[in-house]
Image (cartoon, rainbow, N blue to C red):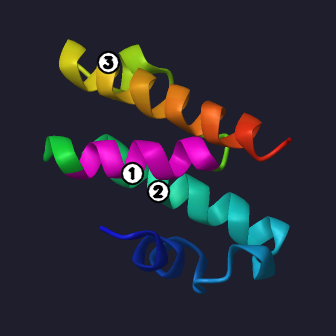
Amino acid sequence: MDLDTLLIRYFGTADAGAVGAETLASGIEHCRVDLGLEQDRGKRFALWSFLHMFGAAPDLDVAFENEEDREAARTFMDLLAASESDGES
């Protein structure tokens, strides 16, 4: 799963800036449903990460049964936050 593929699948375009509010809401809901149905840990993590970037990810204890997956998600959030603060300089 790569970002462009996810954007096209859920929003119909690889240009996130071109997505209207209604399409965004619909795509996020579709992605949340797919996350709930997905059994593969790697794919679940990818879908959760995608939702996190849009501020729509479920809580870690809801999204991941496995503590290793929750810790990987925490690391992802920390890395993303650090990269965002680096860009503010």
Check residue 31 in the rendering and tell me which mark sits there, or answer none.
2
Picture coordinates of residue 12 (x, y %)? 58, 85
Q: Is residue 36 magenta?
A: no
**Of pointers 1 and 2, the one earlier in the residue sequence:** 2
Amino acid type of the residue tagged 1 in the rendering: Leu
The residue sitting at 58% across, 83% down in the picture is 14
The residue sitting at 20% across, 19% down in the picture is 68
- Relative to 17, does residue 28 appear above or below in the rendering? above
**Of pointers 1 and 3, the one earlier in the residue sequence:** 1
Q: Residues within 10 Å of mark 2 (few under 14, many from 20)?
A: many
Select label 1 or label 3 by which is in front: 3
| Chief secondary structure of the magenta portion | helix
Q: Which residues are magenta?
A: 43-53
Q: Residue furthest bottom?
A: 13
Q: CA distance from mark 1 to mark 3?
A: 16 Å
Amino acid type of the residue tagged 2 in the rendering: Cys
- Relative to 30, does residue 44 appear above or below in the rendering? above
Q: Residues within 10 Å of mark 1 (few under 14, many from 20)?
A: many
Check residue 60 in the rendering and tell me which mark sits there, or answer none.
none
> Would residue 76 be seen by someone viewing this image from the given angle?
yes
Q: CA distance from mark 1 to mark 2?
A: 7 Å
**SS category of the residue bearing label 2:** helix
Amino acid type of the residue tagged 3 in the rendering: Glu
In contact (CB < 8 Å): disc 1 and disc 3? no
Picture coordinates of residue 1 (x, y %)? 30, 67
Select label 1 or label 2 by which is in front: 1
Q: Which residue is mark 3?
A: 71
In contact (CB < 8 Å): disc 1 and disc 2? yes
The residue sitting at 57% across, 38% down in the picture is 80
Q: Nearer the viewer, residue 57 or 34?
A: 57
